[in-house]
Amino acid sequence: MDTVVSGIRPTGNLHLGNYFGALRNFIKMQNENNCYFFIADYHSLTTHPTPADLHGNVKSVLVDYLAAGLDPEKATLYLQSDLPETAELYLFLNMNAYLGELERVTSFKDKARSQPDNINAGLLTYPTLMAADIIIHRAQKVPVGKDQEQHLEMTRTFANRFNRLYHTEYFPEPVAYNFGEQLVKIPGLDGSTKMGKSEGEGNAIFLIDEPAVIRKKVMKAVTDSGPTEPNQPKPQAIENIFNLMKALSKPETLSFFEEEYNQCRIRYGDMKKQLAEDIIIFTDPLREKIREISADEKYLHRVVRLGKEKAHESASKTINEVREIIGFKAF
Ligand code: TYM
């Protein structure tokens, strides 16, 4: 049985990218593995949310986890901030993480460019906190989307460095995981290659979006005037619509529109209408459950308390052993 760890930053409700890149794998993995799925609320502090926003966003992710089918009896579902052992391990890992390598991380460079007034130390050390999240449970597998690949590489670097420094094989080498398939990258609706919360209005479809909103967003998705020759390669924005259809529609629907495209008969309006309906069918049951679970504060309280206990059991064992390895010994 493998130990599995993953988390999602609370920035609001989850979108289809989070679902297909991460959450869908969490649900599949919970039956046969020792799973720890958390809400990365420490990580979200890099963007300075207000206390009310932070709490609301944590709740949204928790509710989405449960509505999508994560079972708190099977997997350990917890808040990152309920596990101070993670913060302690983060401190240890930071002692052996070097400025040069942290500055070279793509997500850091992107953030430094997009928010030049807020290049804080938390952003720089984002990968060491993420490594701590993973190795605090000595995980082997980490279900994530394609954008997290480099962070997983850093995690392996930090875990190996710790092992080498202390002449131990204490930490396994965790790998980014998607059931033996390639890691997923769900595109945005605005022609960009990634669906994401911060990519701008209309780029992302959230699990909670109402049918009317979904139709509106999909119909607005960027397209062009269509191919002029048979079997023409697809421009990025068009490729994106096909990729969304691949994730959400039936294979025969996808092949129908592929053929239409290849024969230069494609009507993007029809394709988008179909895609919107398929997204609505997919999200319908989730929306219902999100509403129900969101209203059940007692249940949410129970889930979080249970998760905290179970996560603490695993993390405290690791941190005690790590302290011992480092040389913090009792007098
Ligand atoms: P975050 O919160 O940005 O995204 C959560 C998960 O959703 C995936 N994802 C996508 N997958 C495919 N296509 C997309 N368009 C898309 N957008 C988001 C991400 O790959 C991710 O799996 N650093 C992490 C959170 C984290 C974490 C961890 C993850 C903190 N500690 C430890 C794993 C293990 C992040 O910011 O993901």
Image (spheres, rainbow, N blue to C red):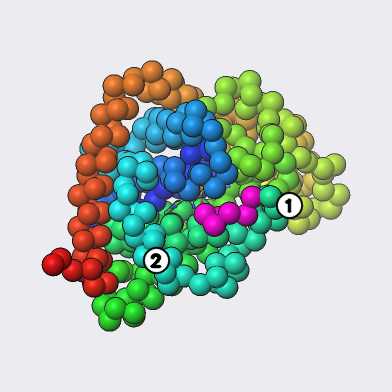
Q: Quadrant of residue 119?
A: bottom right
Instruction: Give coordinates of residue 237: x percent, y percent.
Output: 74, 47
Q: Residue at x 32, y 42 (%)?
A: 82
Looking at the rendered image, the disc whose residue lies closer to the viewer, 2 or 1, is 2
Q: Residue at x 62, y 37 (%)?
A: 204
The CB of the residue at mark 2 lies under 8 Å from ligand 1: no
Binning the other alpha carbons within 10 Å of mark 1 as few (below 14), some (14 to 19) or many (20 upward) gives some
- Nearest the eye: 149 or 260: 149
Instruction: Determine the secondary structure under disc 2.
Output: helix
Compared with 67, 8 (above or below) is below
The span picked out in magenta is 118-123
Q: Earlier in the sequence, mark 2 or mark 1?
A: 2
Left or right placement of residue 92 versus residue 45 in this view: left
The CB of the residue at mark 1 lies under 8 Å from ligand 1: no
Instruction: Determine the secondary structure under disc 1.
Output: helix
Instruction: Give coordinates of residue 38: x percent, y percent.
Output: 37, 44
Compared with 320, 65 (above or below) is above
| Residue type for callout 1 | Gln
Q: Residue at x 30, y 69 (%)?
A: 171
The numbered disc on residue 93 is 2
State the separation of the CA atoms marked 2 and 1. Answer: 39 Å
- Nearest the eye: 64 or 29: 64
Instruction: Give coordinates of residue 258: x percent, y percent.
Output: 68, 47
Which residue is labeled 1 in the image? 236
On-image quarter of the C terminus: bottom left
Q: Say whether residue 257 is visible.
A: no
